[in-house]
Image (tube, grey):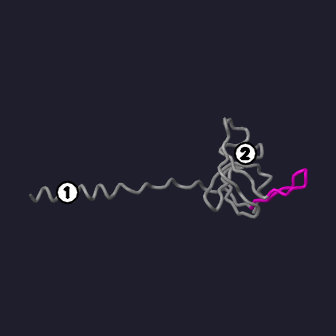
Amino acid sequence: MRHWIILACMAALLISCGGTPVAAPMAAAIGRGTIVGYTQTDGEHVTDITLHNAAAEDPCNPCTSLGFAHEGDRVDILERRANGAVKIRTSKGIEGWMDSEFVKNE
């Protein structure tokens, strides 16, 4: 009888330990920046910059919008490409690619 109680306690302990997944570590930032908007040729000022799942030169079919970075947001810069693409992380934890002309370095 005593063995059954010990086994039941061990089983309960094992079951309770496996419930919460461990979050993946966040990529280290190589810099910080602030999002800047731009004015289109029709005069409209754009303040929301779309973040994509791939840099412009990377093949993706179809490319996916992951969210937005907004003018004035401070962001982590995670990676830079020679073609001007930059990977950023917003304060909400959204990571995505955009053109570096929309990020002012700090």
Mark 2 surroundings within 10 Å by alpha-carbon count, few (fewer than 14), some (14 through 19), many (20 or more): few
Percent position (x, y) of residue 28? 60, 56
Q: Residue 8, which numbered label?
A: 1
- Image quadrant in which you'd find residue 93: bottom right
Q: Which residue is mark 2?
A: 81
- Image quadrant in which you'd find residue 92: bottom right
| Dot 1 amino acid type | Ala
Mark 1 surroundings within 10 Å by alpha-carbon count, few (fewer than 14), some (14 through 19), many (20 or more): few
Q: Residue at x 17, y 59 (%)?
A: 6
Percent position (x, y) of residue 63? 68, 40
Specify the segment rendered in magenta: 34-46
> Looking at the rendering, in which quadrant would you find the N terminus?
bottom left
Q: Residue at x 78, y 54 (%)?
A: 102
Q: Secondary structure at mark 2?
A: loop
Percent position (x, y) of residue 84? 77, 46
Percent position (x, y) of residue 66? 65, 49
Q: Which of the two discs, 2 and 1, labels the residue nearer the N terminus?
A: 1
Relative depth, front residue between 44 and 23:
44
- Image quadrant in which you'd find residue 15: bottom left
Vertically, is 63 above or below 41?
Answer: above
Q: Residue at x 23, y 57 (%)?
A: 10
Does residue 34 appear in the picture of this structure? Answer: yes
Q: Secondary structure at mark 1?
A: helix
